């Protein structure tokens, strides 16, 4: 018996409209923990393969490599959505401005499409000031969208109450076994797009889970494609990390099929609940 090759045909990636007018591709490339040549090559190949959203952060130590990949990919800057995040050391209005300028210098770009607060780090008590710094960047027209990462609903309420400005995006740990239903419901009410880091599970065994494997076999897709389709079918933006050219193409080829209601229900049963996710209120969880 021969196995049918997994389809890696990629069409143009659709986008979701954001609160402040920009539009984010519905699939992106996560770049942690890639650095130097591996990162540059992966970014360049991803862009040449059809990716338009690239996610990175100061903490990853690869903004320069991402920038080189962008500049050598031969894709017009106007087609791209480039996003980065700043650390807790920049949690002040002026600190965010300095962090943004430093990121632009490392990228070799004149603007980012989105800038984000990486973790709230509540023990510092400064994430509201960090958000005010992002709002200033947006109001000055220096960035097209602003977001947060790993913020809980309570953190979101505090920054919105303080500024009246709702984040375009909240990037959180999210995969079918960490479905994050409560924060996603809050995001939907706010109009904030949910972005998923580790969408196919970093070490959770999701790709070998019998439920996922059986669905993949029925659909003649890979387990990773099933996991990523679960995200995009719910308007979640996944940013899987990959450097292998085959996996990069495979991950992006999820816009030409759908999971049935029965398949979605099967996957729903994999959720371990909110308590299984990293707790961003703990001091040790945050940069």
Image: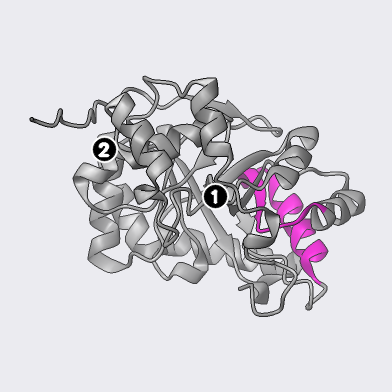
N-terminal label among 1 and 2: 1
The residue shown at (67%, 64%) is 96
Left or right: where 83 falls relative to 43: right
Task: For label 2, count other residues whose C-alpha is less than 10 Å away and answer few (under 14), some (14-19) or many (20+).
Answer: many
Q: CA distance from mark 1 to mark 2?
A: 24 Å
Question: Residue 227 in the image: x percent, y percent?
Answer: 43, 40
In which quadrant of the rendered image does the C terminus lie?
Answer: bottom right
Can residue 25 be seen at all in this image of the molecule? Answer: no
Q: Which residue is mark 2?
A: 249
Magenta region includes residue 269? no
Report the coloring of the rendering: one colour
Q: Secondary structure at mark 1?
A: loop
Q: What segment is highlighted magenta in the picture?
A: 126-153
Give the answer, above or below, for where 37 lies relative to 146.
below
In the rendered image, the residue lying farthest to the right is: 161
The residue shown at (57%, 30%) is 265
Q: Which residue is mark 1?
A: 177
Q: Front-most of 6 and 281?
A: 6
Question: Residue 90 in the image: x percent, y percent?
Answer: 67, 72
Q: Front-most of 194 and 63?
A: 194
């Amino acid at each position: 018996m021969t196995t049918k090759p997994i389809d890696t045909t990629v069409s143009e990636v659709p986008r979701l409209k954001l609160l402040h007018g920009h539009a984010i591709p519905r699939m992106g490339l996560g770049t942690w923990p890639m650095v130097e040549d591996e990162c540059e090559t992966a970014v360049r190949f991803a862009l040449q393969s059809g990716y338009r959203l690239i996610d990175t952060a100061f903490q990853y130590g690869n903004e320069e490599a991402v920038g080189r990949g962008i500049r050598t990919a031969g894709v017009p800057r106007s087609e791209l959505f480039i996003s980065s995040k700043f650390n807790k050391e920049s949690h002040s209005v002026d600190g965010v401005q300095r962090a943004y300028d430093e990121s632009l210098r490392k990228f070799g770009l004149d603007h980012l499409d989105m800038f984000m607060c990486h973790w709230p780090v509540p023990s510092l008590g400064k994430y509201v000031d960090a958000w005010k710094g992002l709002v200033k960047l947006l109001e000055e027209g220096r960035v097209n969208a602003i977001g947060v990462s790993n913020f809980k609903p309570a953190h979101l309420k505090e920054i919105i109450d303080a500024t009246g400005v709702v984040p375009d995006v909240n990037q959180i740990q999210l995969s079918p076994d960490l479905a994050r239903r409560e924060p996603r419901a809050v995001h939907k009410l706010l109009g904030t797009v949910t972005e998923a880091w580790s969408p196919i599970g970093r070490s959770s065994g999701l790709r070998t889970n019998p439920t996922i494997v059986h669905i993949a076999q029925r659909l003649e897709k890979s387990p990773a494609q099933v996991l990523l389709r679960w995200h995009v079918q719910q308007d979640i933006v996944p940013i899987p990390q990959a450097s292998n050219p085959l996996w990069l193409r495979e991950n992006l080829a999820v816009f030409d099929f759908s999971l049935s209601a029965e398949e979605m229900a099967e996957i729903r049963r994999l959720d371990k609940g909110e308590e299984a996710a990293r707790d961003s209120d703990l001091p040790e969880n945050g940069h």
